[in-house]
Amino acid sequence: MGIYGFFVEPLSSEFGVGVAILNMGPVALLLVPAILGAWVGKMADQLPIRNILLVGVTLAMLSLMAISHAPTLWLVALGFLSFSLGLTLYGPVVVNGLMVKLYSGREARALAIVAIGMSLAAATLPPLVGTLLEYYSWRWTLQSLAIGALVVLWLAILIGIPKGVILTPSTGDAPVAKAFYRIKAFWLIGLCVALAMNVAIVLAVCYPPLFASKGYSMAEAGWFLALAGMNGLVGKSFLAWLGDNVRHYVKWLAAGMLILQSAGLGLLFIATNVSEMIPAMCLLGFSGGAFLPMHPYLNSRYFDASIISQVTGAQMPLFLPFGLVGAPLAGYAFDQTGNYNAVLIALAATLCVAALLGLGLPKQAN
């Protein structure tokens, strides 16, 4: 998602559509998990993890290659929908469920370390894509990224996960599949994370055009995002170091990261030069990186590991109402005003609401 925004302007120019239309693309990343999340979660609790991941990676990257050859915007949309399905199969519902089951009692550290991979991608891909787009077409750039990612991800899965691994710990007292819907924490965690992650998606789409509107090139925008990515690495390392030691106060930790991110948006709103942009991106990267593993970690504090993927998958529909309107409305605001000022204010307020929902979580049982 960190590089989606780089392709908005080239596609807008080639297909003759506004930013609002292209900002509807990330809706697919919410629509597919919302529809299939519970099924994928149940599958991840019952079938070999390695096979699910390999199928998802292959489908996702082949879809990106197809998009790079699509002659019409409708085929681009169809390809992105297929990519979203692949991403659901190798994304957080499956991977984070695996980590919670493997590292009981050390969930925060495991989830934070695994999420460091996203920070490495966030630090390397934006400047790479920004530079490539300065010299090559968006089609060549996307195809090259898809091929490279396919090779890297296949190697990571084949080397990192033994064949036939199924991790479904049985504790005897786990809530049955339908029982967790009646638990208050299920809804509060789901809504809190839904708001926060939709803010992250809107920002990922808006960053490149936002920087462009402030007079920066795509290559410079890539380096700003790389800076945020490196600070995301620091944030995840912070969670890995601290998270398990404050497991009884995790809701306060989550709320704190959301408030820090809201403050980062405030700094970004008033930034007028590079010296002001740098602290804003550092704060946004740190707080966003630290919050990223919070969804499965919060769930692990209230639900048994044997159903953790099902719980996470069942919460995915809560992402949809906000996701359907967030990115398109942000694009509409940009089309009308030429900037994202109103969007930044709205996103900061949304993060404050998410923090309040997190603080409303009941006391943990252990």
Image (tube, helix red, strand yellow):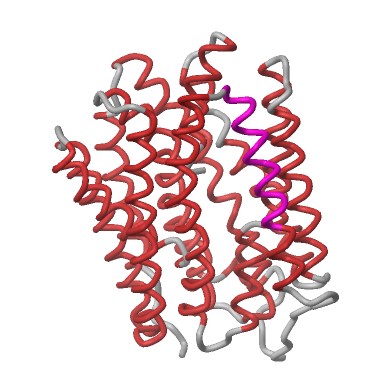
Q: Residue at x 52, y 89 (%)?
A: 105
In the drawing, does residue 40 fall left or right of residue 242? Answer: right
In the drawing, does residue 244 fall left or right of residue 81? Answer: left
Q: Is residue 282 above or below residue 42?
A: above
In the drawing, does residue 335 fall left or right of residue 328? Answer: left
Residue, far top? 16
Q: Position of residue 108 (x, y in %)?
A: 46, 78
Q: Residue at x 23, y 49 (%)?
A: 264
**248 or 28: nearer the eye?**
28
Q: Residue at x 50, y 24 (%)?
A: 135
Q: Main secondary structure of the magenta part?
A: helix
As for residue 144 lying within the magenta part, the answer is yes
Q: Position of residue 119 (x, y in %)?
A: 45, 58
Q: Residue at x 25, y 50 (%)?
A: 262
Q: Which residues are magenta?
A: 137-153
Q: Is residue 356 above or below residue 184?
A: above
Q: On the image, which quarter does residue 271 sit in? A: top left
**6 or 302: nearer the eye?**
6
Q: Is residue 263 above or below residue 46?
A: above
As for residue 364 lying within the magenta part, the answer is no
Q: Position of residue 299 (x, y in %)?
A: 53, 72
